[in-house]
Amino acid sequence: MIALGVILLIIGLVTGISILWTIGVILLVVGAILWIMGSMGHAVAGRRHYW
């Protein structure tokens, strides 16, 4: 999810398409939050670790 967010962010910045940039930022933030919660030991979506 983080990698997809970075890819969409870069494509959105290069092409000037703002919706790709917005979706990229959202995916990047959500992926980072899930990664941090999983690394802290919290169960994310029923799993002990997210990734």
Image: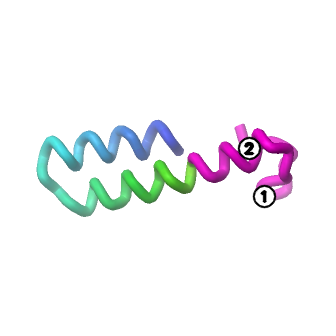
Q: Residue at x 74, y 50 (%)?
A: 37
Q: Quadrant of residue 44?
A: bottom right
Main SS class of the magenta portion in the image:
loop
Q: How many marks?
A: 2
Q: Quadrant of the C terminus?
A: top right
Q: Residue 23 at what x, y percent from top left? A: 37, 59
Q: Is 46 left or right of 37, judged from the image as shown?
A: right
Q: Residue 4 at what x, y percent from top left? A: 43, 42
Q: Residue 22 at what x, y percent from top left? A: 32, 60
Q: Earlier in the sequence, mark 2 or mark 1?
A: 1
Q: Is 23 left or right of 37, judged from the image as shown?
A: left
Magenta includes 45?
A: yes
Q: Identify the mark at residue 45; answer none if there is no mark.
A: 1
Please say if 29 is above or below 4.
Answer: below
**Residue type at mark 1?**
Ala
Q: Residue at x 50, y 42 (%)?
A: 2
Q: Residue 19 at what x, y percent from top left? A: 26, 62
Nearer to us in this view, 36 or 3: 36
Q: Residues within 10 Å of mark 2 (few under 14, many from 20)?
A: some
The residue carrying mark 2 is 50
Q: Residue at x 23, y 42 (%)?
A: 11
User: Are the two marked residues, 2 and 1, in contact with CB atoms closer than 8 angstroms?
Assistant: yes
Query: Which residues make up the magenta segment?
Result: 32-51
Q: Is 44 left or right of 34, judged from the image as shown?
A: right
Magenta includes 49?
A: yes
Q: Residues within 10 Å of mark 1 (few under 14, many from 20)?
A: few
Measured Cα–Cα span from mark 2 to mark 1:
8 Å
